[in-house]
């Protein structure tokens, strides 16, 4: 039961739900998630750590970027079932389509360009 409680606690935050919805569109760099949510890098890092701890996402570091994706077969069966349930719920969630459209726009910009844009501001 503790595993399920951790998962639902991770999903109880609107920003993390938005990230989960965006990750449905594929692997994302941390800078793309920062752009999507408009939050500080440290806040994004904390949110992603919560999602990783729950087993919902996995992060991999490539050079200076960290990429996140939804957990796959490595996740336990309860987590995989919750991910499938969540995926089926997005069409009924307010704002989910907007998140998917926004992340597609963000993904059209390279992580290098996003990082440079943030540095220059």
Image (cartoon, rainbow, N blue to C red):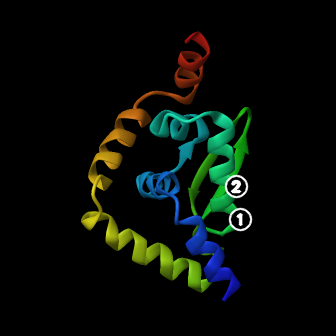
Q: Residue at x 43, y 36 (%)?
A: 107
Residue 42 makes an appearance in the image: yes
Q: Quadrant of the C terminus?
A: top right
Quickly name the residue at label 2.
Answer: 49
Task: Determine whether 88 is above or below 101 in the image.
Answer: below
The single residue placed furthest to the top in the displayed view is: 120
Task: Determine whether 97 is above or below 4 in the image.
Answer: above
Instruction: Assign a secondary structure to mark 1.
Output: helix
Would residue 92 be found to the left or right of residue 82 on screen? Answer: left
Q: Quadrant of the N terminus?
A: bottom right
The single residue placed furthest to the bottom in the displayed view is: 1
Would residue 29 be found to the left or right of residue 50 on screen? Answer: left
The residue carrying pointer 2 sits among few (fewer than 14), some (14 to 19) or many (20 or more) residues within 10 Å by Cα, namely some
Q: Residue at x 44, y 53 (%)?
A: 18
Q: Position of residue 4 (x, y in %)?
A: 61, 82
Q: Residue at x 48, y 40 (%)?
A: 37
- Asked whether the residues under the numbered discs 2 and 1 touch, taking CB atoms below 8 Å apart as contact, a structural biologist would say yes
Q: Position of residue 108 (x, y in %)?
A: 40, 31
Along the line of sight, the residue nearer the viewer: 13 or 22? 13
Q: Position of residue 82 (x, y in %)?
A: 49, 78
Quickly name the residue at label 1.
Answer: 53
Label 2 and label 1: CA atoms lie apart by 6 Å
Instruction: Assign a secondary structure to mark 2.
Output: helix
Which of the 4 image quarters holds residue 58? bottom right
Task: Determine whether 8 is above or below 12 in the image.
Answer: below
Number of numbered labels in the structure image: 2
Which of the 4 image quarters holds residue 43? top right
């Amino acid at each position: 039961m503790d595993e399920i409680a951790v998962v639902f606690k991770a999903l109880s935050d609107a920003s993390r739900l938005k990230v989960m919805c965006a990750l449905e569109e594929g692997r994302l760099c941390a800078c793309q998630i920062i752009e999507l949510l408009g939050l500080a890098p440290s806040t994004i890092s904390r949110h992603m750590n919560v999602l990783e701890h729950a087993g919902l996402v996995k992060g991999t570091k490539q050079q200076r970027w960290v990429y996140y994706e939804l957990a796959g077969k490595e996740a336990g069966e309860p987590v995989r079932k919750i991910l499938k349930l969540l995926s089926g719920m997005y069409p009924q969630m307010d704002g989910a389509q907007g998140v998917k459209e926004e992340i597609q726009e963000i993904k059209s910009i390279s992580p290098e360009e996003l990082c440079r844009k943030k540095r220059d501001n």
